[in-house]
Image (tube, rainbow, N blue to C red):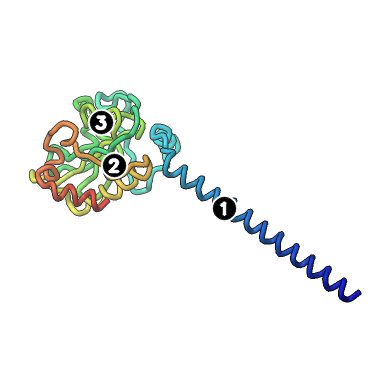
């Protein structure tokens, strides 16, 4: 009787071990499937940029370091036309050295202006948002329809950005790249669209532009 009972317990123990092994294997398969699914989604499924932009504009879920000051609807510089997509981020410099981000934003917000960008970065590092991200700006010529534009203030005619504006620009571009699933190949200059020397310093100093992209 003892031998039979002992054998029965051994059989039951082996069965439990096999069951645990099967359950563990099944759990590993499920986890592997989930990991592969997430990987596939992150690599092959791109975000719809217009849906992302619309959701951000509806929820106003912008980083706290962005000062949202949309220019008034109906101004010549704000057409209200919707972007076709977000394929690139275009970097500009303002055409008036020594001016602030607020001054440039306020210039956009008047009837005399027919130009504007999505963002203006000031010399002290402040960032003003002038347009919703699903609307066209009036900054990048024939690329207005599929780009986000950023104007950067600078102290003098050389056009070099201050350290504060440079760091804020990196932070802003990083956020936009992450938001719209872009990379550094999608960060371009106004010069790359039309051949205009804008942003001036980063056209005349190609190494500085390449360093900026490395810093992103």
Q: Earlier in the sequence, mark 1 or mark 3?
A: 1
Q: Are marks 3 and 2 in contact (CB under 8 Å)?
A: no
- Provide the secondary structure element on which disc 3 rests: loop
Q: Is any part of residue 67 visible from this angle? A: no
Between disc 1 and disc 3, the foreground one is 1
Q: Earlier in the sequence, mark 2 or mark 1?
A: 1
Mark 3: give few (<14), some (14-19) or many (20+) Cα within 10 Å. Answer: many
Q: What residue appears at the point 32 percent right and 37 percent down from the top-left corner? A: 69
Q: What residue appears at the point 8 percent right and 46 percent down from the top-left corner? A: 158
Q: Earlier in the sequence, mark 3 or mark 2?
A: 3
Between disc 3 and disc 2, the foreground one is 2
Q: Could you say where residue 47 lies in the image, as x and y percent from the top left?
A: 42, 37
Q: CA distance from mark 3 to mark 2?
A: 13 Å
Q: CA distance from mark 2 to mark 1?
A: 44 Å
Decide if residue 130 is on the left or right side of residue 190: right
Which label is found at residue 109?
3
- Provide the secondary structure element on which disc 1 rests: helix
- Provide the secondary structure element on which disc 2 rests: strand
Decide if residue 37 is on the left or right side of residue 144: right
Q: Quadrant of the N terminus?
A: bottom right
Q: Could you say where residue 79 lies in the image, as x and y percent from the top left?
A: 29, 24
Asked if residue 119 is positioned above or below residue 155 in the image, the reply reads above
Decide if residue 203 is on the left or right side of residue 24: left
Mark 1: give few (<14), some (14-19) or many (20+) Cα within 10 Å. Answer: few
Which label is found at residue 128?
2
Asked if residue 83 is positioned above or below residue 166 in the image, the reply reads above
Of residues 45 and 153, the one nearer the viewer is: 45
Q: What residue appears at the point 36 percent right and 31 percent down from the top-left corner? A: 134
Q: Could you say where residue 103 lies in the image, as x and y percent from the top left?
A: 20, 39
Residue bearing the label numbered 1: 31
């Amino acid at each position: 009787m003892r031998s039979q009972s002992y054998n029965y317990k051994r059989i039951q123990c082996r069965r439990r071990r096999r069951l645990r092994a099967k359950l563990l294997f099944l759990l590993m398969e499920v986890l592997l499937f989930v990991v592969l699914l997430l990987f596939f989604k992150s690599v092959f499924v791109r975000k719809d940029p217009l849906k992302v932009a619309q959701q951000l504009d509806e929820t106003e879920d912008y980083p706290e370091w962005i000062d949202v000051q949309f220019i008034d609807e109906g101004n010549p510089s704000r057409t209200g036309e919707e972007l076709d997509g977000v394929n690139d981020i275009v970097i500009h410099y303002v055409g008036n050295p020594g001016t602030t981000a607020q001054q440039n934003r306020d210039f956009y917000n008047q009837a005399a202006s027919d130009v504007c960008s999505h963002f203006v970065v000031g010399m002290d590092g402040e960032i003003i948002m002038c347009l919703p991200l699903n609307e066209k700006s009036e900054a990048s010529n024939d690329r207005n329809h599929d780009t986000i534009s950023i104007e950067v203030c600078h102290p003098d005619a050389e056009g070099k950005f201050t350290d504060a504006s440079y760091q804020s620009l990196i932070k802003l571009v990083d956020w936009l790249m992450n938001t719209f699933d872009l990379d550094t190949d999608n960060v371009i200059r106004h010069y790359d669209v039309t051949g205009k020397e804008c942003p001036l310093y980063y056209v005349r100093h190609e190494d500085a532009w390449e360093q900026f992209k490395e810093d992103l």
